[in-house]
Structures are given as C-alpha cells and as structure tokens.
Amino acid sequence: MLVVEDLICEYPEGEGRTVRGLTLPSFRLQDGEAWGVEGPSGSGKTTLFHCLAGLLSPTRGRIAIDGVELTGLTEPERAQWRGANLGYVFQEPKLLPFLTVAENIRLSARLAGKEASARRIRDLLAEVDLPDCGDRFPRQLSGGERQRVAFIRAIVREPRLLLADEPTASLDVRNSRRILDLLLAYQARSGCMLLCASHDPAVQERFARKLELRKEEA
Amino acid sequence: MLRLAFLSLWRRPLRYGLLLLLTAVACALPVFVIQLAGGLYQGLNRAAAPFPILAGAKGSPYQLVLNTVFLRDRPIGNIPYGEVETLRQSGKASQVLPLAFGDSYRGFRLCGTEKEIFSYEVPGEPHPWLVPVQGRSFAGPGEAVLGAETAKLTGLKVGDVFQSSHGFIAKGKAHNHPYRVVGILAPVQGPYDKAILVPLEDIWEAHGGHGTVGHGDEKGDVTAVLVRPKGYGEAMQLLAAWQRKKGGPSQLLFPAQSLIALYGMVGQSRQFWMMISLGLLGAAVLVTLLALYWDGTSRMEEWALLRALGASRRRTQALLLLEQFLLLLLGSTLGWLLGWGGSLLAAAGIGQQAAVQMSRAPLWQGFLAPLLLLGAGTLGGVVPLWLLRKKDIAPYL
C-alpha cells in the first residue's frame, strides 16, 4: 500500500524566492489498484512521481510504501529501495544508446537485484511484438518500439509500484493505445500498484480512480 | 560495471576517439624524448665502458675520446710506443693495449692493435669484449678481423682479401697493403662493430713514411693506448703520475669524465624538451578533464536514468570515474607505444648515421609520463564528478 500525507515540494529559485512545485492532499493507493493522475502542465505530476521514486525529497509530508517510510531513508537507501520496488516508464523512452535492447533490459533487472535470462528477455519482447529486436540498438527502433522496450525495462524488475509519467505523450494514437493496454494488462496480471500521469482524456478514461492535481502559485 | 564502462566507450568511437587521440599524443611526446635521451645516454655509456683510461697525444681530450672510443673525427697525433711500455711497467695496469688509426676500408676504420685485445675484458663484464663468432682472431701479418657491422655492410667474408686506404674517407688513397679476413666479431652494440682490427705492425708497414712507421725490431708510433687499471686507487695514481710528467708526449684521461661534460650539454637540451613535453602533458590533462566534464554534463540524462533505475549516486559516479580511467589507461598505453615506437624509429635512423648504438629497451623513466597522465587524470576526474554531483537530475528525466 502507498500512503501519501500532506506532501509539499518547494524549490529555491534565486534571491530567496521559492517556487511551490506540489501541494497534495493525503491519499492511499491499495495493492492492486491503478489510478490515473491528471492535471494541467505545471501542476506537479512529474514532481509527485520524482518524490514517489525517491529522486526528490519533499519539503514536507510523508510517503510510505508497504510500511517503508521513503521520506526517512538516506539517498543510498532510497536508491536501493527504488531498484527493488519501482518500475518507471517515462514520457520519452530514455534507453541507454550504447546498449542493445536486451542489454538495456538486463541492466534494469540487475539494478533491481534480479537476473533476466536471454530467453526471458526474448519472451518479454515477443509479448510486445518485438521478438527479434534484442540485438538492436535504440537508434534502430521507431519511437513506438522504443517505448515498448522502455515498458519491458520497467516490468522486468517485477515492481511493486509502477509509475508511468505521460507514457503516451510522444506516440501516435495506435501506439498510445498499445502502451496503455500493456500497462493495464501487466498491472492486472501482477497485482502491482500503478499510477499513470497523463493530460490526455483518452488515457484518463481508462482509469476508474483518479488523482487530480491543481496548479498552485508559491 | 566494468563491462558497462567499456561498452560506453567502445560503442561510441567518434565521441571518444578524439579524446583518446589527444591523450595518446600528449603522452607520446615526453615518452619519445625520455626514450631518445635515455637511449642515447645508455648508448654512450656502453660505448665508453671498455675504455676506463685512455692515453693519447696531447690536445683536445674530446677529440681523443671521439677518435678512439667512437671512431669519429681525426686523431690528434701519435705517441711513441714507449708510452705503452711505460704504462705496462708501471705495475698499476692489468692490461695495456696500443691502438693505431689512420687507415680505412670503404670508410670503415682499421684499428691496429695487438692480439691480446681479443682477451681484453671490459671492467664488470665476465666475458672478453671482442670475440670472433666466425673464423678466429688475427695471428700474424696481413690478417684482419671485422666488426659485425663492417662484415654486414661491406659483404666481406672470412677468406676475402681487401686493400686498405689511407685516411678515413671511402675513396682515400689506396695502400699497396692487402689484408685477408680471418674472423668476424660478435656484435658489441658499439662503435667497434664498425671497426676492422689488424696487427699493429701492419699499420706501421702500410704507413712507411707517414709517421707511424717502424723498421725491423724498431717500434713505430701509436694513436692511443687503452689501459685497464688494476683498481680505482691505481687509476688515480696513474693519472697523478701523468699530470706530474709535464714534459711527456702523452695525456692520460678518463673517457667517462669527458662524457659527463658532454652529458651536461645534452642534458640542457633534454631539460628543454622535457619542459615542453611536461607543459604539453599538463595541457593535455587539463583539456582531458574539461572534455570529461563536458562529456559528463552532456550525459546527465544517462546518469539520471541510471539513478532512476536504482543505481546510487556513488555507483553512477564510480561508473563515470571508471570510464575516465579506462579512457586514460587506453590513451596512456597508446601514447607510450607511440612514443617508444617513435624512439625506435629514431634510434634506427641514428644507428645508421652515427657511431653510437642507442639502447632500444624501454626505460623505466618512460613509464612516468603515462603514469602521471593516468594518475593526474583520474584524480582530476573527481573534479567534474564533484561538479556533476551538485546537479539536480530531476529535469533530465
């Protein structure tokens, strides 16, 4: 279960001023739940995800996942927690350009403390219709194909919490639907918690429960 | 992590090729200078090692050393054979060998001496200096033993006959004095590889009327005398005795002392090149660090991604440091090979032109430049890491 209480994130912005990046009421995401996260640009969707991933420390508030107080962990502990529990799908696929598709996936698994055999990687790639792409480099794939690889890279870790930050923003309609189908199918199958941020109504309508963020001034 | 660092470099040859080249060239120059200067130093030392003490006509000590040790330049003049006997009778020398120059064959100098030279041992060496590997040493008049290079370059073989010329140029005036090759020496990696050893009496005979002549039992002149003292004390006593003998026909010197003065001159030039090389090395370290910092900032997205996937900050920093280390290691190694290879080419060129055979073995000093570059570069690599550490990765995700 994910517990978020009274989260506030502020950034320093020179001359003593601060910008409030996020103000969030408390919410709880139960195991096996999938929520959409919606809000206009600048409302703090990405900031929320960075806080949930332990990449950013909130100014105030509390985040606990499966009983682990994320806000109380040190940076190395947060990195370890992230590796073991988190899957992250970004707006852009962000694959390492000097590694092949299979190596990108294997590295992700290793950083989660898991081993991904060549056969498992092949099977996972076959699931997203990329059966023979393991030896290719990211530059040899289309945008939609890269995003599917990024999805495999996130789920090969068997995460407890899957964060998808605008995963369809740079894709066409067909590829958007494909990625969303894959995310939801995996969430249903694995029982992990899923938060999917998007400003696309077509994406948001796929989620029964939603977390709505509003833009605030400091 | 090592594999990841290696792949990051290996699969981006354009990105890192230029940096690698820069590192290699910066490292190669000091290695080249050190190898060349050190090789020359060792070559000069090796050439002078068989000559602990020289006696010769009064005049420039450098000229005497150049003429006798390096077989270059003209002899100062001659001294009577009586000087050889005086030195032998002094009781302070274990070996005294006369050397007479003045003739050549196709530019290769004839060295008139006595057959005891084939049993002469260089101080500190367990074996004789000049040993025939083909044929034998000379035993009588008209016989010649060729240095290894002389045999190779002239094509003369054991049993061949040649006529010597007066002077040291290839087309000098021919003597009517034939020699038969009876032996070829093992290489000594020094000027005497290009010598032709003949009996002293043959030089006297060929020079009838040129000043080194001897008739019947009468002894002629010699150009120099090679002396191996019994010990350090005896060497100093000999030198003192010769200095007291102001009116004598000869001077006595330690060739090593003349070489030390020579090193002083070479050393200044070596220091000049070392300063330039170290400056280049320092500039290369700086440019490499700037390039690494630029590289690090341009790859923030990659570091951010690795962090998001669960790699700690320390681990991503270690990866960057490892990449830098590998790059510097490869560049330094390549640079050392370039510098050493260049010095080998230069040594080959110098070996053909000069009397000194430069040492080609890698010198330990030559490893300092790559080690310095590797050490300074890796330590300096912490600076860009420290700067990158302060960067917020969130905007890159």
Image: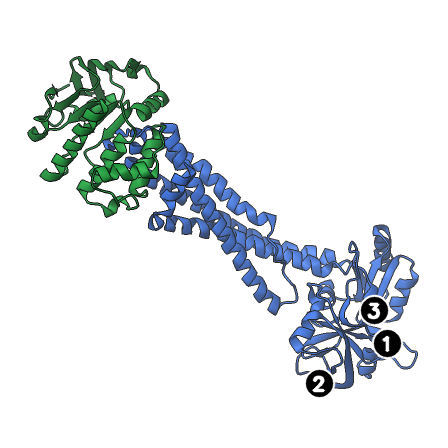
Q: Colour of chain A?
A: green
Residue under label 1 = B220
Element under disc 2: loop
Q: Callout 2, which amino acid?
A: Lys
Decide: few, some or many residues near mark 2? Use Cα within 10 Å; few <14, some 14-19, many ≥20. some
Occupied quadrant, residue A12: top left
Q: Where residue B227 appears, x then y in whole percent?
A: 83, 61
- Kindly identify the residue that appears in the image at 52 percent across and 47 percent down: B369
For residue B345, side relative to residue B12 (left or right): right
Chain represented in blue: B
Element under disc 3: strand
- Kindly identify the residue that appears in the image at 61 percent across and 66 percent down: B351
Nearer mark to the viewer, of 3 and 1: 3
Occupied quadrant, residue A197: top left
Please say whether residue B334 is visible from this viewpoint.
yes
Decide: few, some or many residues near mark 3? Use Cα within 10 Å; few <14, some 14-19, many ≥20. many
Residue under label 3 = B98
Occupied quadrant, residue B324: top left
Residue B339's disc number? none
Residue under label 2 = B173
Element under disc 1: loop
